[in-house]
Amino acid sequence: MESLLNTQVALVTGAGRGFGRAIAEALAAAGAAVALLARSGAEVEQVAAGIRERGGRALALRADVTSRAEMEAAMAATVGVFGEVTLLVNNAGTAGPFGPMTATDPDEWWAAQKVHLYAPLIAANAVLPAMLAAGSGRIINIASRAATMFQPGLSAYVVGKSAQVNWASHLDAEVKDQGVRVFALQPGDAPTAFAHGTLASAAAQQHLPGMLDILRDWVANVDPAPVLKKCGERVVALAAGRYDGLAGRYVDVDWNWDEMAATADQAQVNSVTELHTAAGDKA
């Protein structure tokens, strides 16, 4: 195992599959001790077992990310095994509910916002006291390109991701002077179980047929492996502190981070839209 992150303790939510799994495995391969958290205990235990078989350090935790009690218990378990968390990756997400806001159950729509916003908030509040006391630490919200767009019928996801990016910017502004940095990372576009779940949704089929036609073709023709690998590598680079100058903003895995970091002190970008326009074509 590499030792780039051998002093770090990471907690990754939604770590049983897709991007969460790729991130957890990459962090472990770089030497971090990793707590993997998801609602499905069987999935994260399988991923954790694979990490341990390869010589890594991994702990599987089952918890609902929107339950404050369960998340605080998971944090305590992580600290008990590995020590204080130095890296939090808020990856857990939900795509629905699908459909116009006028036809969507408000309670279902709001439940999605609990995943997008309340879950990162309670996770951050659990890890921040130790990070602030140590004068260091990083929090990475796994964002989405949806944060920069409008998509009728997909408001729960789009609004949630946009707000999550803004939340990361605000939190970074509050804690950066105390040594903690916060990022919003667009992880890349890979056909994972998340996409397959959207395709299988009756509501998505009813309200988003055009988008699903595009998604169906994309799922059939795109190999997720290199996208997941690149995402894992990028998270490792953020965890190692190589790109702290990009904290507090939305960053895409496919942008030229070295060029952006070199000009970070000169550029004053005040919104996700401005950043996307200014840097989206840099590769």
Image (cartoon, rainbow, N blue to C red):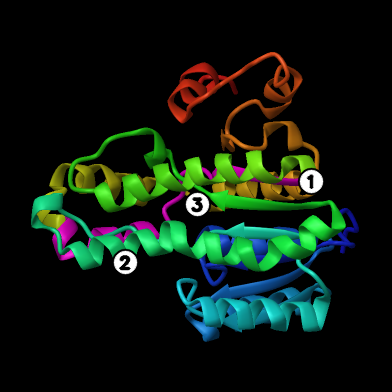
The magenta stretch spans residue 199: yes
Judge whether 228 appears above or below 264 on screen.
Answer: below
Whole-percent x and y of residue 103? 8, 56
Nearer to us in this view, 278 or 163 = 163
Quarter holding the C terminus is top right
Looking at marks 1 and 3 on the same chain, the residue that comes earlier in the sequence is marked by 1
Whole-percent x and y of residue 8? 83, 62
Callout 3: 10 Å neighbours few (<14), some, many (20+)?
some
User: Can residue 30 be seen?
Assistant: no
User: Can residue 104 be seen?
Assistant: yes
* For residue 195, side relative to residue 278 (left or right): left
Give the residue pinned by disc 2. Answer: 111
- Given the image, on which type of amino acid does mark 1 rest? Gln
- Given the image, on which type of amino acid does mark 3 rest? Pro
Q: Secondary structure at mark 2?
A: helix
Q: CA distance from mark 3 to mark 2?
A: 28 Å
Give the residue pinned by disc 1. Answer: 178
Looking at marks 3 and 2 on the same chain, the residue that comes earlier in the sequence is marked by 2
The magenta stretch spans residue 103: no
Q: Which residues are magenta?
A: 180-204
Judge whether 159 appears above or below 27 on screen.
Answer: above
Q: CA distance from mark 1 to mark 3?
A: 37 Å
Callout 1: 10 Å neighbours few (<14), some, many (20+)?
some
Q: Secondary structure at mark 3?
A: helix
Q: Residue at x 14, y 59 (%)?
A: 104
Judge whether 17 appears above or below 98 on screen.
Answer: below
- Given the image, on which type of amino acid does mark 2 rest? Ala
Q: Residue at x 53, y 60 (%)?
A: 120
Give the residue pinned by disc 3. Answer: 224
- Which of pointers 1 and 3 indicates the residue nearer the eye? 1
**Quadrant of the rendered image containing residue 206:** bottom left
